[in-house]
Image (spheres, rainbow, N blue to C red):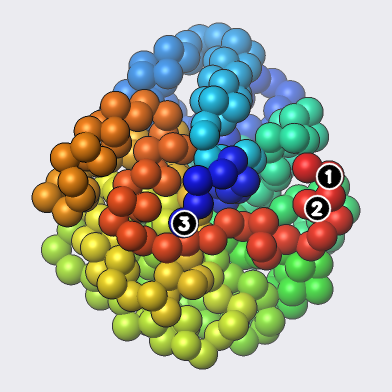
Amino acid sequence: MTSDKTLIDCHVHLAALPDGDNGCYISPKMLKSPLFRFLFWKHGLSIDHPHEANAKYLDDLLVELRASQYVQQAVLLGMDGHYDSNGVLSLTDTDLLVSNDYVLKAAQAHPNELLAGVSINPQRRDAVEEVHRCADAGATLVKVLPNAQQFDPANPKYKPFYRALAERKLPFLSHVGYEFSLIGKDQSVGDPERLRVALDEGATVIAAHACSYGLILYEKFLPTLRDFVKNYPNFYADISALTLPNRFRMLLHLRHDPDVQKRLLFGTDYPLSVFHLPAWGRVGFGELRKMMQTKNRFDRQVEVCNGLQLGFRSLSELLPQPTLASR
């Protein structure tokens, strides 16, 4: 827990409409989805004006980040696409693609506030080369969403990819549990047990959403989370989205688990909302009122977790010193 502006949010999404030269893509189905329409309406973004919408999204993020009392930097996350059996990008089966070049460019333009969280689907035939290219360009971590990108992290053919991540000291941040924001094709690959191969190959693995299942009723992955914490010193989990109604049961479990808390990293899942509901009846009224009055999503995530005595760390503790020296 902390009260200083020193945290890095390791889970912030960079949204981008394709503008002709940013390498991004959104499927027609995704453009019409209620969630996508709601997010663009909420942020006042126009689908018909991609350049302006992309600039406004980034500007709004920077304004909120700079206003945060606790969070100094955010890792912008890209989103790779689906690749066929030959490792070739298939836009037909891709709903969203936020290119690594776009992520790197945005982070390079604001080095004091933003870090690059590139996305590399290990199924792509140039996955290892892309690891090295992005590492050379200053990437901080690699993010994947197997449910939507349609690959199984446990596939042994990805071992060279995981070894490259370990060599370049790039943490591997993987979605865990059900996926709702994008169109999850195979929800079974959200099982954290499938991350064991990456851990065994020496990669630093960050399981998103603290391994919460995402279906409200129960937390089936809690034993795996505890097993990984016990047996893998290169395993971490982030606390992004843990205040959402479908995930906060995991938050309530972990507030009583100090061993797991030592491996938790701060994250929000921006631009998604941060809810104060988990704190109701569990903190004093004055503390709850402060959470309710806090509009900054970064700060509310800190305050809710602090109020529930959920310990966490900053991604900065995992990063090589040269990366921190540039802050």
Q: Are marks 1 and 2 in contact (CB under 8 Å)?
A: yes
Mark 1 or 3: in front is: 3
Q: Residue at x 60, y 27 (%)?
A: 66
Q: Position of residue 163 (x, y in %)?
A: 74, 77
Q: Which mark is residue 244?
A: none
- For mark 2, give the secondary structure: helix
Residue at mark 1? 326
Residues 52 and 187: in front is 52
**Residue 247 falls in image quadrant:** bottom left
Q: How many marks?
A: 3
**In this picture, residue 22 sits left or right of residue 167:** left
The amino acid marked with disc number 3 is Met
Left/right of residue 70 with respect to residue 218 in the rendered view: right
Give residue 227's quadrant in the image.
Answer: bottom left
In this view, 50 is above or below 132: above
In the image, what residue type sits under mark 2?
Answer: Thr
- Quote the CA–CA distance across marks 3 and 2: 23 Å
Q: Helix, strand, or loop for circle 1? A: loop
Viewer-side residue, 233 vs 89? 233
Q: Nearer the viewer, mark 3 or mark 2?
A: 3
Front-most of residues 127 and 283: 283
Q: CA distance from mark 1 to mark 2?
A: 6 Å
Q: Which residue is mark 2?
A: 323
**Sequence order check: which comes first, mark 3 or mark 2?**
3
- Residue occupying image coordinates x 67% and y 56%: 316
Residue 61 position, x and y percent, is 55, 26
Q: Can you say whether 21 is above or below 297 in the image?
A: above
